Amino acid sequence: MEPARTPATPPVHPPRRRPGPWLALVLAAGLLLPAAAWCEEKDWSLGFYGGQYYDSEPAGFSQGRANYLHQYIVALTASKTLWRAQEWPLSLEVDGMVGHQFGTATLQEFAIAPVLRWSGFPWSGVLPTSIRAGPLGYSYTTIVSPLERSATGEGSRHLNFLMLELTFSSPRAREHEVFLRLHHRCTIYDLLNNYGANGQDFFAIGYRRFY
């Protein structure tokens, strides 16, 4: 007779452990990290703009009293955000530019100004929009443009720099910004000199990227 066979013992597998809550947290963090990095505010920007001279102050431009002349500007611009309000869509930046003018006169311009940015518009979720205003700054030109000279031929290379901007970007790419700028040199209503000249005014279109 054959000896009785002992039934084979089925293999014993260790019990499967269910993923703990820590795994869910890790996965959630991994999904959120890119979004958090994307939402980080970028403080530096570089850009450029180009525009044409018009023969009135910014107030005249806003009222449609602007005649464009044969003088143009191309410029590089950079900015740095210095402060952001916690409860308001308001920030303080410093803006600088290096420009080249040509047409009626050829010269270079260097300017810098503190700038306030307001971005609290109800449609900004669809089309991020902001207004930038820098009423008091410093502008230097390598020569006195003939468009800036008074009736007696006087003028100054050192004037106040004023800039106003309307900016637009995409909700998905806020680091790319297109802007319309009023670029203005002036004596602050004859505070810097009493030559009686207006200074210079340009309406420009530009682009900047934040880093």
Image (cartoon, rainbow, N blue to C red):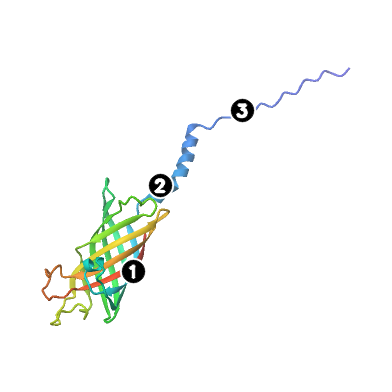
* Residue at 24%, 60% in the rendered image: 133
* Residue 182 placement (x, y as % from top left): 27, 67
Give the label, 3 or 1, closer to the camera. Answer: 1
Q: Quadrant of the C terminus?
A: bottom left
Q: Amino acid at mark 1?
A: Tyr
Provide the residue designation for mark 2.
Answer: 36
Provide the residue designation for mark 3.
Answer: 14
Q: Nearer the viewer, residue 63 or 84?
A: 63
Q: Quadrant of the N terminus?
A: top right
For marks 3 and 1, the one nearer the N-term is 3
* Residue 20 placement (x, y as % from top left): 50, 31
Q: Secondary structure at mark 2?
A: helix
Q: CA distance from mark 1 to mark 2?
A: 31 Å
Q: Nearer the viewer, residue 23 or 112?
A: 112
For marks 1 and 2, the one nearer the N-term is 2
Q: CA distance from mark 3 to mark 1?
A: 68 Å
Q: Amino acid at mark 3?
A: Pro
Q: Secondary structure at mark 3?
A: loop
- Quadrant assignment, res 92: bottom left
Q: Secondary structure at mark 1?
A: strand
Give the label, 1 or 2, closer to the camera. Answer: 1
Provide the residue designation for mark 1.
Answer: 49
Q: Amino acid at mark 2?
A: Ala
